[in-house]
Image (tube, rainbow, N blue to C red):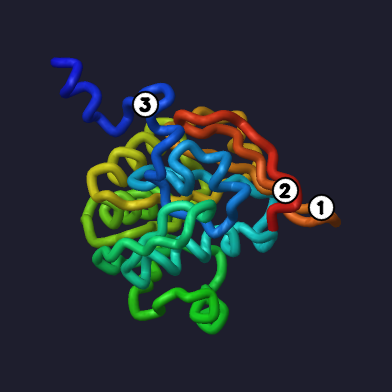
């Protein structure tokens, strides 16, 4: 394989080049964007969000980016003047959410409800299959999933499916998953305190670990 061909692979990171390129999807939180190599959420890959329990801001963290995707535009970095690039609106798939998404709150956050899909598989194997199919279809801009378990092999399958379908996978997992290997491009841990929700960047492809106190 030639060097030029190798460098075309999205899983290859070139030191120094990506750090100065705004390839990410703006999160809506400038402090977070500054810590991510592409200046925002890594697109076309798997992001894992680890929490002790749900409802501490994990969805609020995603809402600005999901609103962009469902509306069919993408802004690059929150540190620069807002530049919206037109794109095809994609479906936002929710696979096995542990709650019923609250439509008025989502709509208030800018989510186009007509672009939402809710999938309720019967078990974890069906959940992963559904998420893979949605990610690789090329029609879903983002796929959110809540698996009970997610081993290294399954995370690799999700990462590859996201790359194939140019989609963004977001897996919500318990804090105990921190000790388990993962192929995710980005892993975050959220911790709730009296001062707010802290966001720990545990793993960021091409970046470094960081702690963002009271981001939410």
Q: Nearer the viewer, mark 2 or mark 3?
A: 3
CA separation in Å, label 2 and label 1: 7 Å
Q: Residue furthest bottom?
A: 104
Q: Secondary structure at mark 1?
A: strand
Kindly identify which numbered label has been placed on residue 193. Answer: 1
Q: Is residue 12 above or below residue 59?
A: above
**Residue bearing mark 3:** 13
Measured from the top left, where is residue 1 in percent x and y? Answer: 14, 15
Which callout, 3 or 1, points at the residue further toward the start of the chain?
3
Measured from the top left, where is residue 91 in percent x and y? Answer: 32, 67
Q: Nearer the viewer, residue 2 or 114?
A: 2
Measured from the top left, where is residue 90 in percent x and y? Answer: 29, 66
Residue drawn 44% across and 41% down? Answer: 38
Q: Residue furthest left?
A: 1
For the residue carrying disc 2, how many other residues have a C-alpha within 10 Å: few (<14), some (14-19), or many (20+)? some
**Residue bearing mark 2:** 198
């Amino acid at each position: 394989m030639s060097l030029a061909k190798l460098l075309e692979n999205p899983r290859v990171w070139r030191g120094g080049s990506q750090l100065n390129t705004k390839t990410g999807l703006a999160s809506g939180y400038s402090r977070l964007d500054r810590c991510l190599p592409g200046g925002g959420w890594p697109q076309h890959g798997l992001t894992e969000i680890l929490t002790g329990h749900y409802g501490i801001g994990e969805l609020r963290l995603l809402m600005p980016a999901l609103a962009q995707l469902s509306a069919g535009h993408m802004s690059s970095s929150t540190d620069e003047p807002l530049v919206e690039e037109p794109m095809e609106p994609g479906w936002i798939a929710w696979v096995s959410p542990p709650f019923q998404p609250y439509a008025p709150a989502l709509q208030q956050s800018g989510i186009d409800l007509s672009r939402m899909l809710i999938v309720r598989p019967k078990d974890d194997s069906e959940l992963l299959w559904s998420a893979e199919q949605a990610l690789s279809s090329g029609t879903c801009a983002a796929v959110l999933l809540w698996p009970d378990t997610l081993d290294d092999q399954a995370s690799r399958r999700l990462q590859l499916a996201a790359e194939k379908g140019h989609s963004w996978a977001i897996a919500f997992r318990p804090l105990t998953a921190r000790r388990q290997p993962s192929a995710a491009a980005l892993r975050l841990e959220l911790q709730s305190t009296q001062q707010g929700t802290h966001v720990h960047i545990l793993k960021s492809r091409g970046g470094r670990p960081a702690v963002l106190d009271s981001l939410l």
